[in-house]
Image: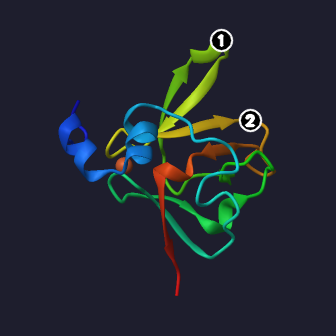
């Protein structure tokens, strides 16, 4: 597919822990209020847990009360794909470098973007700013 970061399923399985693999590579969703980062307010950058690309800044994180990390915008363009699973029309967001599933974007976020990127903690790795 011409991604910057390509791995075989076998390699992903080896590199990721089971929950990261299930979410990133199998489009799973972590149970709400269980992930590592939904409450995190520290300053820093959220990287893709699959490939390390910088995805979100802590300044754009907000608490939507939904139990997943929520961001009003990404640091750069993410891949988006229409997702009609579970009988709803949603927009899936994926890491542009490795194609990993991150979560979904909704249009009920705060001003000025009005967007809410609802992202699985399992898809992220937090890098604190010192
Ligand atoms: Fe990635």
| Residue 4 seen in the figure | no
| Residue 130 seen in the figure | yes
Left or right: residue 61 compared with residue 30: right
Snapshot quadrant of residue 79: top left
Q: Residue at x 27, y 43 (%)?
A: 13
Q: Residue at x 53, y 81 (%)?
A: 129
**Mark 2 and mark 1: Cα distance apart in space:** 18 Å
Colour approach in the figure:
rainbow
In the foreground, 4 or 26: 26
Indicate whether 98 appears above or below 76. above
Snapshot quadrant of residue 53: bottom left
Q: Which residue is drawn at 64% across and 44% down?
A: 117
Dot 2 alpha-carbon crowd within 10 angstroms: few under 14, some 14 to 19, many 20 or more: few
Left or right: residue 77 compared with residue 110: left
In the foreground, 50 or 95: 50
Dot 1 alpha-carbon crowd within 10 angstroms: few under 14, some 14 to 19, many 20 or more: few
| Dot 2: element | loop
In which quadrant will I find the N terminus?
top left
Q: Where is residue 107 in the image (x, y as percent from the top left)?
A: 74, 35
In the foreground, 49 or 71: 49
Q: Where is residue 33 in the image (x, y as percent from the top left)?
A: 70, 50
| Dot 1: element | helix
Left or right: residue 19 compared with residue 10: right
In the foreground, 78 or 49: 49
Q: Mark 2 points at which residue?
A: 107
In the image, the residue with mark 1 has its CB under 8 Å from the nearest atom of ligand 1: no
For the residues labelled 2 and 1, say whether their Cβ atoms are less than 8 Å apart. Answer: no
Left or right: residue 48 compared with residue 86: left
Residue extending furthest toward the bottom: 130
Q: Mark 1 points at which residue?
A: 87
Q: Where is residue 5 in the image (x, y as percent from the top left)?
A: 24, 47
Sooner in the amino-acid sequence: mark 2 or mark 1: 1
């Amino acid at each position: 597919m011409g991604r910057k970061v390509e791995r075989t399923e076998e390699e992903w399985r080896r590199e990721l822990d089971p929950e990261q693999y299930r979410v990133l590579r199998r489009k799973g969703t972590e149970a709400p209020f269980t992930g590592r980062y939904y409450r995190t307010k520290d300053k820093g950058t959220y990287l893709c847990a699959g490939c390390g690309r910088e995805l979100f800044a802590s300044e754009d994180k907000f608490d939507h009360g939904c139990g997943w990390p929520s961001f009003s915008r990404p640091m750069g363009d993410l891949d988006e794909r229409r997702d009609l699973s579970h009988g709803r029309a949603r927009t899936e967001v994926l890491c542009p470098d490795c194609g990993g599933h991150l979560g979904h974007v909704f249009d009920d976020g705060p001003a000025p973007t009005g967007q809410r990127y609802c992202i699985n903690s399992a898809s992220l790795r937090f890098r604190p700013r010192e």
